[in-house]
Image (spheres, helix red, strand yellow):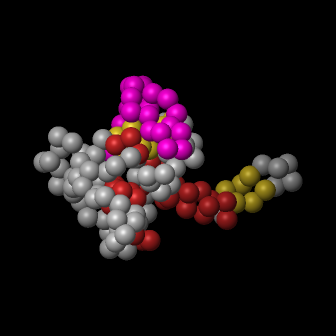
Amino acid sequence: MNHYGTLIPLGTIDFYPNYGWDQPGAGPVSSHLLAASHLRAIDLFLWSIGNPERFGTNKVLDGTPAFEFPVTKVREVDTPAEMGYHAYRSSAREGNYYIGTTKSEPWIPGNSDIQPAMPSSTPNGLLHDKEKENMEHEREEENSQTDSTGYCIIS
């Protein structure tokens, strides 16, 4: 085996930057850096926090990858997905999405004019639309009562 990990899809939506194989600029696997391309996932995810809508793609793999065999053909679909922290905003509900990346920030080919935004120094303090919506819903549930007919009364 010439790599660590698997290419088999494990989620409802899986992303395969550069077909899920060698990541540009990540370096070869060596005794000093066993993770090599795996570490790039951390870089891409961290960058996605401060750069919403930059990792959008409407390309999916044209087939399902096997344990050691990537799919290297893509096709376009109507429903785009966003890789990274903001993936929950995507309208896509399933698929094996492809996105090409470069060896350094801003990671997106042909977009060297993008100035990467830095994520908050307190990532646990970040509240995004979906999280705010969930908190408001929980607050409403705490302040609600049910009358004898089963109807919910919001105070």
Q: Which of 72 and 100 is in front in this view?
A: 72
Residue that appears at 24% across and 55% down: 25
Visible in this render: residue 47?
no
User: Is residue 63 part of the magenta span, yes or no?
Assistant: yes
Task: Spot the residue most to the bottom.
Answer: 122
User: Is residue 107 part of the magenta span, yes or no?
Assistant: no
Give coordinates of residue 54: x percent, y percent: 29, 46
Give coordinates of residue 151: x percent, y percent: 78, 49
52 vs 91: above or below = below
Please indicate whether residue 23 sits to the left or right of residue 135 in the image: left
Number of marks drawn: 0
Q: Which of 28 and 151 is in front in this view?
A: 28
Residue that appears at 44% across and 54% down: 3
Residue that appears at 54% across and 44% down: 67
Task: Spot the residue most to the left.
Answer: 113
Please indicate whether residue 10 sits to the left or right of residue 17 in the image: right
When asked about the image quadrant of residue 144, the answer is: bottom right
68 vs 153: above or below = above
Visible in this render: residue 48?
yes
Give coordinates of residue 155: x percent, y percent: 65, 60
Residue that appears at 67% across and 65% down: 142
Q: Nearer the viewer, residue 39 or 3?
A: 3
When asked about the image quadrant of residue 40, the answer is: bottom left
Q: Nearer the viewer, residue 86 or 76?
A: 76
Magenta region: 55-80
Task: Spot the residue most to the front.
Answer: 1
